[in-house]
Image (cartoon, rainbow, N blue to C red):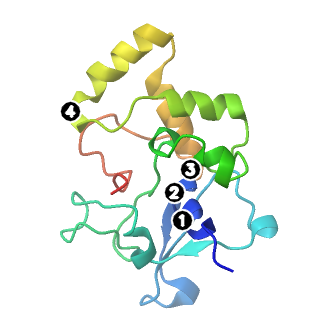
Amino acid sequence: RFNNNYYIAMLANGWMPEKAVNGNPQKNQWTNSNELFDVALGGKQMMLDTDLCLAYSTGRLSPSGTLRAATDDCCAWTMASNLAEGGITTYNTGKFCDVMDPETIEVWRSLPTGFAANDFREIWEAWANETGLNPFRIFKDARAACCDGNRFWSGEPGDTSDCGGVS
């Protein structure tokens, strides 16, 4: 029976490359990188380049503009605010990158996204003044949840620690 779980998993989880699967350098894939994901409970989750290219693009890392597990060293993920209203609760039992706290997810959803990389500082500073929240910390916390605890992000346009945005 077909359902939307494949697409939900693609967008509501983080993905990092797993290179040389079983020691074979010709076999590379993307694996669930959520900090709270437990393989023992959820089983191994993987995607191929051809799966993730449906959702993510990255012209700055690969000349082709597509993700390649064999050559990219980044985390493919998106902010909760990029997902449809109610999509996390309706289709993914309230989880985003395996975080289930509704208040945390709501703060992540409220962070403005979808603007040009060179505009984010001005937009986030205005949002911080309006809400009293630190957008950089919120972004890094969400990134850590989706990218195996990795909070590193320079905050500079062109930072390649993230694979790129949702297509």
Q: Are marks 1 and 2 in contact (CB under 8 Å)?
A: yes
Name the side, left or right, on which 66 lies relative to 84. Answer: left
Mark 3 to mark 1 CA distance (whole Å): 16 Å
Helix or strand or loop: what does disc 1 sit on? helix
Which residue is disc 4 drawn over?
Answer: 118
* Foreground residue among 121 and 71: 121
Kind of residue indicated by mark 3: Cys
* Foreground residue among 118 and 161: 118
The quadrant in which residue 156 appears is: top left
Q: Are marks 1 and 4 in contact (CB under 8 Å)?
A: no
Helix or strand or loop: what does disc 2 sit on? helix
Mark 3 to mark 4 CA distance (whole Å): 23 Å
Quadrant in which the C terminus appears:
bottom left
Kind of residue indicated by mark 1: Tyr
The quadrant in which residue 163 appears is: bottom left
Quadrant in which the N terminus appears:
bottom right
Which residue is disc 3 drawn over?
Answer: 146
Helix or strand or loop: what does disc 3 sit on? helix
Please name the residue shown 70% across and 51% down the image: 36
* Foreground residue among 114 and 38: 114
Name the side, left or right, on which 161 lies relative to 92. Answer: left
Q: Of marks 3 and 1, which one's residue comes earlier in the chain?
A: 1
Which residue is disc 1 drawn over?
Answer: 7
Kind of residue indicated by mark 2: Leu
Mark 4 to mark 2 CA distance (whole Å): 24 Å
Mark 1 to mark 4 CA distance (whole Å): 30 Å
Q: Is residue 115 above or below residue 8?
A: above
What label sits on residue 11 in the rendered view?
2
